Image (cartoon, rainbow, N blue to C red):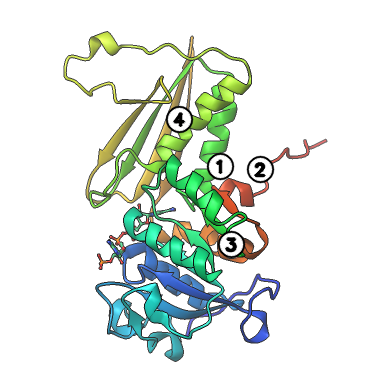
Amino acid sequence: MTERTSEGDGVGSGEDGRLRVCVVGASGRMGAEVCRAVAAAGDLSLVAAVDRTGAGLSLGEAIGSAGLAAEEATLGVVGSLTGIGGVHVDVVVDFTVAEAARENLDWCATEGVHAVVGTTGLGPDDMVDLAARFGEGSSANCVIAPNFAVGAVLLMHFSKVASLHMDGAEVIELHHDKKRDAPSGTAVKTAMDMVAARQSAGLDSWPVRGADLDVVPGSRGALVGGYVPVHAVRLPGLVAHQEVIFGAPGQGLTLRHDAYDRKAFMPGVLLAIREVPRRRGLTVGLEALLRLGGIEATP
Ligand code: NAP
């Protein structure tokens, strides 16, 4: 039996104020990990599991019983959110693909169920749509984050700071070979955030360097935000990694984050589940939930 941890403050509708959670994509790599993380959290209850392939099985049959209590292992997996019937849910967690996530978010907004979304591949148009659906249009809130690893969010934050002081940067993202989108949402956001940070500080764009040396098309990467080259690596054995390499005359700075295991994402996912009931409307990015303000200097 897994030891249960508790950090919530009883905002859920379940027994003892626990938040009642449904995981969509429950037998996927991330979804299964989320099921186990929710099951291990003393302030959360795993009350429903949705998955196409696992539909008709018990959750224990779909993902294995390790880390699940008997009532979680025997939960019946259903094929879609409409199949959860009368089960009361406070928060839906979605780790699927963009087309499925759009449908699931529609259901959440209509039914007034909060949503935490890790699925990548949703674009700026989706964000506009979700801001409207989860703003005035629904009693439910939505937290969507392209990366739930706290270290990766810190990397993005530090990259914004460094972009104001260095003379150029390139992003290299490295992922397992099953990842369907490239470049990763995190790499795109890192580049876009650096561009936005420089713009709001009144700094010029960095020059595009070496495009004329592109002997083989694509060798200088994809330009994101107009001038930040992003390179995507896909290999078996990798999980999720990113480097941002900064240059300036006579010096370099490399920031790197490595997620070695999908457990790296779980503290961020659990934080989002706990926070989503009190974050009105749409919240984009885990950074909004972390305290990234100034740190008092040591005297
Ligand atoms: P995965 O193992 O392939 O799992 C995907 C899940 O989505 C499976 O349960 C799959 O069910 C389901 N699915 C796929 N297409 C569907 C459809 N059309 N309708 C309904 N369900 C569908 O992938 P993963 O590695 O867990 O990643 C899932 C998502 O999370 C991806 O978008 C990935 O980029 C993202 N991700 C985000 C973070 C983050 O921190 N935000 C971290 C890692 C991954 P079937 O087996 O039936 O196809």
Q: Secondary structure at mark 3?
A: loop
Closer to the chain start, of discs 1 and 3, is: 3
Above or below: residue 43 compared with residue 140: below
Instruction: Identify residue type, mark 3.
Output: Ser
Q: Residue at x 31, y 11 (%)?
A: 210
Check residue 191 in the rendering and tell me which mark sits there, or answer none: 4
Q: In which quarter of the view is residue 50 placed?
A: bottom left
Pick whichever of labels 1 and 4 is earlier in the sequence.
1
Residue placed under numbered mark 2 in the picture: 292
Query: Distance between the Cα atoms at labels 4 and 2?
Result: 19 Å
Q: Viewed as shown, does residue 30 lie left or right of 237?
A: right
Disc number lying in front (3 or 4): 3
Would you call the spot at circle 3 few (<14 residues within 10 Å), some (14-19), or many (20 or more)?
A: some
Residue positioned 43% across, 42% down in the render: 125
Q: Could you classify mark 4 by the number of other residues whose Cα lies within 10 Å: few (under 14), some (14-19), or many (20 or more)? A: many
Task: Looking at the picture, tell me which residue is in the foreground, 130 or 176.
Answer: 130
